[in-house]
Image (spheres, rainbow, N blue to C red):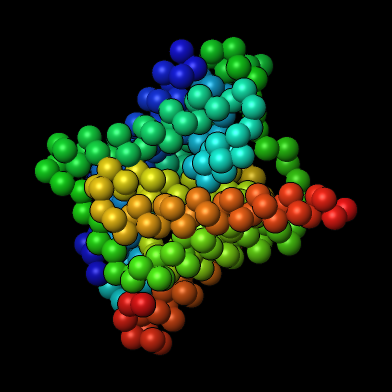
């Protein structure tokens, strides 16, 4: 369980929105992390530099905040085998479904895309069901 | 300039994820867990991000090209198909198991924690598997 922290949620969320708007208005691109990583891995021609720089920026920005705050909390309860399975599902699923929380959940919904709304509802409901099964049916973490 | 703006966007995105603690899987799972001391933080993070992005999109919509003269590369509107729903469901399973989605996982590499690196590596393998499957499919048809 974690505390509800509305102020940091709104500030952090707003900053994510600023970042997505910047990438759109300056580079003409959608800030969908899975798409950017997937296309980087596919070595799509001519557009490599901005993708790699954007991806490298993510840990730099998070690391800076961690440095200012005196540490970043990453409380992971899943075991290594579960993390591996989860990573495979997230990687394959986001490419098949053409987006993740950032591409569909933020950028797509901001454009009023029906596809993104359907995808976001689907992954939210599926994830909530999995958490319910893990925490309340199987009684804890895997 | 294009490189600078992409780098800055990445840094701001990562900072936003860290400030809102989306880099903490337990925080994300506490949002997804509706029956155990629900933490609605993620909804506010998404709501705030959506509101600001929607403003950015409104500005973009009235322009021919980006401020740096780049064409807008936006997805062409298309229907809701089986691939979209199956992909989103698979992603949801992984997200619910680990509490990590792609952006926060990559940002959390900053912590240097081994489990984060393991998750990101598995995610990359998952994406490569998808690419391989797509290539195979294209060959067959």
Inspect this view and state whether residue B22 appears: no
Image coords of residue A95 (percent x, y): 61, 51
Q: Is residue B121 left or right of residue B60?
A: left
- In depth, the one of B62 and A123 nearer the eye is A123
What residue is at 33 percent from the left and 86 percent from the top?
Answer: A139
What residue is at 56 percent from the left and 40 percent from the top?
Answer: A41
Q: Is residue A114 left or right of residue B136?
A: left
Inspect this view and state whether residue B82 appears: yes
**Figure label count:** 0
Q: Is residue A61 left or right of residue B49?
A: left
What residue is at 29 percent from the left and 69 percent from the top?
Answer: A77
Q: Is residue B69 left or right of residue B133?
A: left
- The extreme left residue here reads A70
- In depth, the one of B60 and A54 nearer the eye is A54
- In depth, the one of A66 and B127 nearer the eye is B127
Image coords of residue A101 (percent x, y): 49, 51
What residue is at 63 percent from the left and 32 percent from the top?
Answer: A44
The quarter of the picture where residue A48 lies is top right
Q: Is residue B57 above or below residue A91?
A: above
Q: Is residue A83 above or below residue B48?
A: below
Image coords of residue A99 (percent x, y): 58, 49
- In depth, the one of B104 and A126 nearer the eye is B104
- The extreme right residue here reads B141
């Amino acid at each position: 369980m974690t505390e509800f922290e509305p102020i940091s949620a709104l500030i952090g969320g707003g900053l994510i929105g600023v970042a997505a708007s910047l990438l759109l208005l300056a580079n003409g691109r959608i800030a969908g992390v899975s798409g950017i990583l997937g296309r980087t891995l596919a070595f799509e021609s001519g557009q490599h530099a901005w993708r790699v720089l954007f991806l490298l920026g993510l840990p730099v920005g998070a690391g800076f905040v961690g440095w200012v705050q005196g540490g970043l909390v990453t409380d992971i309860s899943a075991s290594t085998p579960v993390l591996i399975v989860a990573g495979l599902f997230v990687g394959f699923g986001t490419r098949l479904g053409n987006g993740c929380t950032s591409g569909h959940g933020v950028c797509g919904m901001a454009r009023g895309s029906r596809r993104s709304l359907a995808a976001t509802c689907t992954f939210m409901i599926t994830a909530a069901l999995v958490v319910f099964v893990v925490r309340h049916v199987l009684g804890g973490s895997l | 300039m294009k490189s600078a703006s992409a780098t800055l966007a990445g840094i701001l995105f990562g900072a936003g994820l860290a400030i809102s603690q989306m880099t903490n899987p337990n925080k994300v799972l506490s949002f997804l867990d509706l029956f155990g001391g629900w933490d609605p933080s993620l909804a506010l993070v998404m709501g705030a991000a959506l509101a600001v992005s929607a403003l950015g999109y409104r500005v973009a919509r009235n322009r021919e090209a980006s401020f740096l003269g780049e064409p807008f590369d936006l997805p062409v509107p298309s229907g809701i198909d089986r691939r979209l729903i199956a992909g989103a469901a698979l992603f949801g399973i992984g997200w619910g198991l680990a509490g990590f989605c792609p952006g926060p996982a990559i940002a959390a590499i900053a912590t240097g924690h081994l489990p984060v690196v393991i998750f990101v590596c598995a995610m990359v393998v998952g994406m490569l598997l998808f690419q391989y499957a797509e290539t195979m499919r294209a060959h067959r048809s």
